[in-house]
Image: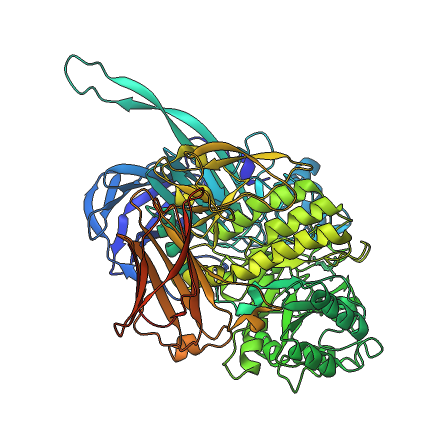
Amino acid sequence: RRQKLLHPGKSLYRALLDSVTLSDDSVKFQIIHEENKVLLQVEICEIEGNIFRLKIDEVSPLRERHKVPDVLIKEPTTQRLFISQKEAGILVLTSVNEDYKLQVTANPFQVELQSKGETVLSMNSNGLLYFEHLQLPPRKPTAENEEAASDSSKEKQEALGLWQEKFGSFVDIKAHGPSSVGMDFSLHGFDHVYGIPQHTEALLLKNTSDGDAYRLYNLDIFGHKIHDKIGIYGSVPLLLAHKPNRTSGIFWLNSSETLVDISTKAVAEHVPSRSAAETAKQRAVPQTNVRWMSESGIIDVFLLMGPTAFDVFKQFAQLTGTQALPPLFSLGYHQCRWNYEDEQDIKAVDAGFDEHDIPYDVIWLDIEHTDGKRYFTWDKKRFQNPRKMQEHLRKKKRKLVVIVDPHIKVDPTYTLYSQAKEKGYFVKDRNGRDFEGICWPGSSCYLDFTNPEVRKWYADQFAFKTYKGSTNILFVWNDMNEPSVFKGAELTMQKDAVHYNSWEHREVHNLYGFYQQMATAEGLIRRSSGKERPFVLTRSFFAGSQKYGAVWTGDNTAEWGYLKISIPMLLTISMAGISFCGADVGGFIGDPEPELLVRWYQAGAYQPFFRGHSNMESKRREPWLFGKKNTQIIREAIRERYVLLPYLYTLFYRAHTAAEPVMRPLWVEFPGEIETFGVENEYMLGNALLVHPVTEQEAKAVSVLLPGSEEIWYDFRKFKRMEDPGILKIPVTLENIPVFQRGGTVIPLKTTAGKSTEWMIHISYELHVALDTEACATGELYLDDGHSFQYLHKKQFLCRKFTFHKNILSSSCTDESGKYHTTCVVERVIVLGFVQQPTFVTARSKDGKEKEVVFTYDTKTSALTLENLALSVDADWEICIN
Ligand code: MIG
């Protein structure tokens, strides 16, 4: 409310260029506000890899202002900036390689960032820099000045919520008064912006001029609506902007409640005349203005200069880390429900999958498995022997995930509570008592995960000897960690609650879930003495959560609209660094009609995290409960997922090592094709697969955009080459959804699915080689033990590359530092778009042995199938087609 009183116009901030100091790390100077005369310190630095950082803090604040800890993986490596021009009112800074120039204007204070002469973005050009300096609280009113203070000024104070604010029955007391910060950014030439999850919104961020701003404030909103800018569950304050030749990012590192206003407009640009005869012209250039506003903290913003989308992903990962490499089992299918009742239920559901020949890897236990919602315990009647139950699952080569929420039941006989209480590990209220709120167990306290000591202690709770009844096939789900507080203000913790180091909750709110998942993942790693990769699913998240596991989109509803919106929601989360994401298959709330459930399985099979889940009040929903035909179709969808796992796992390795999102919007792969910029009903899985889920009821056909004028696309199942790229009307049946392989790619698959990922270790591989216009293709396969950190510590992995060139398919190693032995072979190769029937085909292994290969050629589809190859996955070989 206070920031919104400041309208675009001339900024009252002026830079004091006499104060400029230059060091190896940064350039510093002060700015002053013409009215209140408060001095702010500006610090600009260039970070290795085309990143700029701008920090603004008070020169001498009354107390230290909050700076987000633990999100950056390390202090970024800076590069020296040079002053290339300094004169009255202007300071120009140049990067070492002279590609970038930062022009600081003194009055009003503005910063413009140019890349090779092109202005990419400017800051405070609309004068919306806003910085509330910390102040002493107003003096307690004495009887006299109470009278003197006019009612209207008191009212005004209250309306602006400087020192206290009311929300319904809640009063938020602001111990340190107003501390809000904000700034505007103009993105020149851009009218497509993305990112800032999590909202139930479209892929392209919308103009917010006549409505709500996008809000980043982690909340548990049960039955959240579609197309809403209110924040839900998680936040990543990263915005991406794209135009045909450039992608840029703005990372606003602030963990307090944040609002983002966006307005895109066309501005007139002066085009100078090229010759004397030609008169100067004006042309309309798009521009997007983005205004960030946060409740507290400092301004700490990273400008990610790309120039490609993949560069921006790398830059963000350089700051916040890459996706943790998931254990392979967690890329399989997960079966969840609130709740699987007891041991018998678990066994019966597990058996159901085998009976119906449907693969799955993990069965889940929701809150009812505990003794009265005391996490880390078991309901003794329903789960008399949790270890035995896990041994049963282990024999079936499957895993168990249990829920562990952050609220702790107030119960002196519950060890977790009494210990935490004694050690002072709970978040406090503003009066210094343990903050108490209501949640599942009734009266609850909340662990203060912002405290490193609490995180360590919490991690230790996962030790096998401490967590009774847990075994190494048990993994964890963190829910309710926004945190969710029933009957709390907006169903979360009051902002005036107090954390470690006396920070108020308002400062750290959006980090709460991030920290819980961090501590949980650490716990799982530690219980295995550092050997095994953890799996932790979290509902709340922040920038950097990718390092700790997976996220899901929370309580969606079993309606078509929610299936549809799940695609842009997952794409947005993926672009914000979190590749391992998914939405509850089937929709959590309500009962999906069978057709919707089938369609959801078909979509989910091609999304990173694949879990069926349903609410307590909904009907049972195991995949075989909807008749023979639907069971068959769901089985097929899940089996397709399993067959595709080598590709998916390889994509996760790329996400882990090179920050490439697993699931990505079309525009990222086709950055020059404007028609892809807003596409959100289909997406790319890696660079090779285009997936178009069916999200309309009773669809008979869908319009698919096959992008790229130079591309060839193939039907992923029928192998047939599609007509020329563009928008195609593709007939659909309930059996499956349209999926296409891009020419020029090789996809590694398994020849068949098994009961779970662990059952599939020895199943052989199949390669789908899709030729491009030059009859070439390449692709990769990553392989390791699928569960440990040996790939990292002992370099036990394989990175293979498959190249098709001049009718020779060769397998080679792309990372000689990795070694991993496997007896697996490539059994079959299918070459798509092979123009004529070959006469003979030979395979040659590295030792020079040659053998003839059996093949079949389908003249209708131009697919060439090579069979019985038995070529080692871990060795070099060649197949020559003549
Ligand atoms: O408000 O633990 O989003 O997946 O099943 C309900 C019970 C609390 C919310 C989660 C949902 C989970 C449920 N939880």
Give the quadrant of the C terminus. Answer: bottom left
Q: Residue furthest right?
A: 381
Q: Nearer the viewer, residue 111 or 444?
A: 444
Q: Nearer the viewer, residue 125 or 877?
A: 877
Quadrant of residue 355 within the rendered picture: bottom right
* Ligand 1 found in image quarter: bottom right
Q: Residue furthest bottom?
A: 465
Picture layout, residue 227 above or below residue 775:
above
Number of marks? 0
**In the shown orientation, is residue 748 left or right of residue 282?**
right
**In the shown orientation, is residue 315 left or right of residue 646?**
left
Residue under the image location 27 percent in, 42 percent down: 115
**Position of residue 851 measured from the top left corner of the image (x, y, whole percent):** 32, 68
Residue under the image location 39 percent in, 41 percent down: 712
Residue under the image location 68 percent in, 39 percent down: 155
**Position of residue 612 measured from the top left corner of the image (x, y, whole percent):** 68, 57
**Position of residue 333 measured from the top left corner of the image (x, y, whole percent):** 62, 62
Q: Residue furthest top?
A: 277
Q: Residue furthest left?
A: 276
Give the quadrant of the N terminus. Answer: top right
**Position of residue 462 measured from the top left corner of the image (x, y, whole percent):** 63, 79
Does the image show residue 558?
Answer: no
Does the image show residue 598?
Answer: yes
Report the coloring of the rendering.
rainbow
